[in-house]
Image (tube, coloured by chain):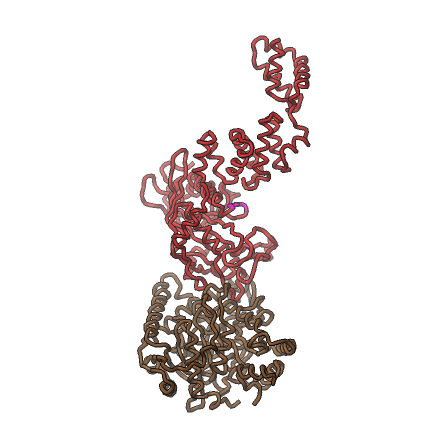
Amino acid sequence: MELYDLTVHELIEKLEKKEISVLDITKSYISRIDNKEKDINAFVTITDKEALEKANELIDGKASSKCYGIPIGIKDNICTNGTKTTCSSKMLENFVSPYDATVVEKINNENMICLGKMNMDEFAMGASTEYSAFKKTKNPWDIERVPGGSSGGSAAAVAANMVPWALGSDTGGSIRQPASFCGVVGLKPTYGLVSRYGLVAFASSLDQIGPITKDVEDSALLLNVLTGHDEKDSTSVNVEKKNYLEHLKDGVEGLKIGVPKEFFGEGINEEISKSVKDAIDKYKELGATVEECSLDIADQALATYYIIACAEASSNLGRFDGIRYGYRTNNFTNLNELFRNSRSEAFGDEVKRRIILGTYVLSSGYYDAYYKKAQKVRTIIKNKFNELFSKYDVLITPTAPTVAYKIGEKCNNPLEMYLADLCTVSLNIAGLPGISIPCGVNSNNMPIGMQIIGKQFDEETLLKTAYAYEQKTKFRETYKPEL
Amino acid sequence: MINENYDIVIGLEVHSELSTKTKIFCSCPTEFGGEPNTHCCPVCMAMPGALPVLNEKVVEYAIKAGLATNCKIAETCKNDRKNYFYPDLPKSYQISQFDIPLCEDGYVEIDVNGNKKKIGLVRIHIEEDAGKLNHDPYGRGSLVDLNRAGVPLIEIVSKPDMSSVEEADIYLKKLKSILQYIEVSDCKMQEGSLRADVNVSVKKKGSTELGTRTEMKNMNSFKSISRAIEYEANRQIDVIENGGTVIQETLRWDDVSGKTFSMRDKENAQDYRYFPEPDLGLIKNSKEKIEEIRKLLPEMPEKRRERYVSEFNLPEYDANVLTMEKALSDMFEGATKICNNPKTVSNLMMSEVIGILNNKEMESSEIPFTAEQLGNLVILIDKGTISTSIAKKVLLEMFDNPAEPQKIIEEKGWIQISDEGAIKEVVLKILEANPASIADYKAGKDRALGFLVGQAMKETRGKANPQMLNKMFLEELNK
C-alpha cells in the first residue's frame, strides 16, 4: 500500500499520529504523476516543483488546519494567481490570472498544496474531455475510453491516484458524470453554496464548483473547505456555514427516498438501470423507505439546459476578443477582422457551436420562442422538484445513461454527446445539489455511477445517504482500475 | 430660423455619470483622469472569472434622481446585459437595464418665457460606462484606457415633449441643475460626465402624426446641442419640402462645419441580445427604503427661488439665475449669511461673478474662492473700506489668486481713502485744474459735477470714497 492509495481522511489520520509527514504525501503523489501521467494525460500544467517547495516549507510548521499539507488538483478553469489558467483552450494557452479564485484562496488559507491544473473540455463544454485543445485524457479503468467531462482531468487523476482529490466545476453534469465514468465520488453543491468568483464562467446561472474525491468522507471534508459566503459573488448565498462531517455517519434509518421512474427507461443503458436499482434495494436493508415516483422532465430539461447554457456562454465568452489578454490573430487589417479572426482561430468547434446557438436564441425575433420560454420551463422544473421534495428527502437516479465510451466514439456527433447530460442537467436548472457515487461495474468492468439528488442546501442529507451506501458496499475495496 | 409651417419634435437621452466614490460593480475609484489603466481591477478589466457586485450607492443615487424628477420607483427591478463587441467594452457586454428600469414615468417642469411646461420622462435606468480609446494621431493604432470602465451612469430618457431649440436647452439646463442639487452628479460636461443623445423629427404644423426621427449621439455641450437641433430640423424640412423622405438613422454632428453626417454604420442594425444578468440578483427597493431616500432630498431650485424672492426681496429674474446652479446658489446663501446683505451679494454675483465664469469658460462649481470670502468682500464695501469699483477688481483677483479680500486690498493698496483731509486736498486740486467745469456747474449744468468726481477718482486710482467726494465737491462749488 502506497500513500497515494489512501483517501485524504486516512492521510490526515496518519499525519495526526505522526506516522508520515506532509512531504511524504506530496512526494508520493509526484512520483505517481511521474509514472502515470504519460498514460492518462490528466494535467494541463503540473506544478510539482512549487508543490515540493511548499511541502518543504510546511513540513516543520504546526498543522494550523484540518487539511494542512494535503495536495490537490485544480480544474484548469479555476483561476490561480501565478500559474496558467487555460480552460484547455488555445484562447488562453498562455494566460496567467492576476488573482486567485475565492476557492483557491480558501485552499491556500488551509495550506493545501496544488499539484497542478487539470485537463477539461474547452471552456467546460463537453462530456468526454476530448474537446480539450491540448490533449485527450484517458480513463484509468480502460485507457481506450474517455474519462467523461468536462472535469475529466480531475476525475481521471483522482481515479488514478495522481491527486488525492480535485476541484471540478459542474454546469450540466461536469463533476458528476466524469466521477461516474471514473468510479470516484463527485459532488455538485447547491447553486450559491460555493463562490464562483474566479471560476471562468461558462453559464453563470448553472456553474458550480465542487469536490471530486475518492470517497464520501473526503467529499464532506473538502466541501467544508470550499463553502462560505463570498461578498465578491452576488449569487453566493449567505447561509450559516455547516460542518458536513458532523452528521455524515448518522445512517439512513427512516429516510424517504424517491425513485423517479422516467430516469430508468428510454435512453438509459439496461445494465446501469439494474445496477442502480440494486443499489436502491440496499437502502431498504439500511432502513430507508423507497418509493417510485414520477419526474417527467427529461426532454424539457435537456432542451432548456442547452438554450440557457448556450445563451449565457455566448455572452460570457465575448470577453475573449483578442484585445486585452489571450490569443490575438496576426491576420487582420481592421477591428472586425481582429475580433473575428482571433476568435475563429482560437476557439474549438464545440465552443463555436455553442456560441452560435446561444447568439441565435438571444437574437431579436427568437428571444421569446427560445430563451424566454426556457426560463419559464426552468420555473416549471423547479416546481416539479419542489413537489417531490415535499414527499421525499432525496431522489436517486443513474448519473449517466452509459458507462465510459471509447475515445472518438461520439465526438463527431454532438447531439449524442449532449444526451450524456440527460440525468444531470435538471439539477443545475433547479439549482439543486447532487452527488455521484460508484455503485458497481458493468460487464466490461467499467464503473457505474448512482446520482443522489438533495434539497437545496441540504448537502448534509445527501452526504449521509451516500456515505451509508458506500460503507455497506465498499466499492473502493472491491473494484480498482488496473493501472 | 426654422420654417414656420413645421413643428419640431425633440426627445433627449441624457447620460450622467454618478459621483459615487467607487465604480458600479467593483471598488475602484471613479475619479476622473489618472494614468491610463490605474483605476482598474480584475472586475472592471473583465478578467476571466471576475464577477460584478452592485454598488448600493448607485441605486440610492439613481432613486434620488428619480424622486427629484417625479418618477415612480420600481420596488423590484433587475440588471440586463447589452451585448456588443468594441475594444472599450471589456466584457463585450454592458450591464444596463432593459425592460424594467429603476425609475419610470416622471417629468421635469421647465419655465419657457414665464410659461410652465412639463417635459415627460419615460425612464431613468442605471448602467456602467465604457472605457476610453486613445487613438494614435498618426494612425498607428489605438490604446485602451479602462479607468472609466464601470463608472456608474444613469440614462434619463425624455418623452419627445420638446418643440423648440430653446425648450431643449432649458430642459437640459434644468436637468443639470436638478442633478447637481441632489448631489448625484457633478455634471462636468468637458469631462463627459453629462452627455446627451438627441432625437429630432419634424412634422407639418398642427399634424398629430410624428415624423421620422434621426438621432445624434454623444453630444456634450449645450451650444452644440442647440446648433445641431436647429441644423437637423432645417435639413429634415428641406428634405420634405423637396419631396424626399427623412431616413431614420444615427447621425454624427460636426461642430466645426456645423453639419450632421450620416454614420452609415452597420451598428445601426445592432442586435444587442439583451438578457437578464445572471451574475446579479434582483434589485429590491422597499417602500421604507424609498421614503428614507426621499428624506435625503435637499431644497430644490423652485423652493429656493421662491424663498429668495420672499425672504431676500430679490427680483424674480435674479432669483432664477442664482438658483439655476447649486454651486452659485450655495455661494449666494453662504455669503449672505456672513454679510447679511443679500442685495449686494446678488448684484456682485449677477453682474460680476457670472460674467467672469463665462469669460473663463468655468463651471460655477469651479469658483476658487469660498462663500465666506465673498461675504467678507461685501462687508468691506458696506464698511466703506473699498468702493464697488474696487470690489470688482478684488473679485477678479480672487479668481486668479484666491485669498481673503482684506489681504488682497492691503497688498494691492486698494483701501479706500476716507480721510477728510486727503479727500479735500484732491477736491481742491481738481477744482483748480478745471475752472471751466466750475463755470459750467454754476451755469446749471449738473453733469459737470459728475465729470469732476470722475477726475478725482482717476487721480486716486479709484480709491477715494465716492460719497465723500460728491459731498465735498458740492460744498466747495456751492461756497
B420 relative to B106, above or below: above
B80 relative to A198, above or below: above
> Which quadrant is home to the N terminus of chain A?
bottom right
Which one is in front, A211 or A57? A57
B447 relative to B91, above or below: above
Q: Quadrant location of residue A16? A: bottom right
Q: Position of residue B13 (x, y in %)?
A: 43, 48
User: Total label count?
Assistant: 0
Q: In the visual, does B308 lie left or right of A323?
A: left
Q: Position of residue B333 (x, y in %)?
A: 51, 36
Which one is in front, A22 or B79? A22
Q: Main secondary structure of the magenta part?
A: loop
Name the tint of chain B in the rendering. Answer: red
Q: Which residues are magenta?
A: B186-190
Which one is in front, A258 or B145? A258
Q: Position of residue B115 (x, y in %)?
A: 38, 35
Residue, x 62% and y 32% (percent of image)? Answer: B394
Which one is in front, B232 or A288? A288
Residue B44 appearing in the image? yes
Residue, x 61% and y 33% (percent of image)? Answer: B396
Name the tint of chain A in the rendering. Answer: brown
Q: Is residue B188 magenta?
A: yes
Residue A415 appearing in the image? no
Q: Position of residue B33 (x, y in %)?
A: 58, 51
Q: Is residue A135 magenta?
A: no
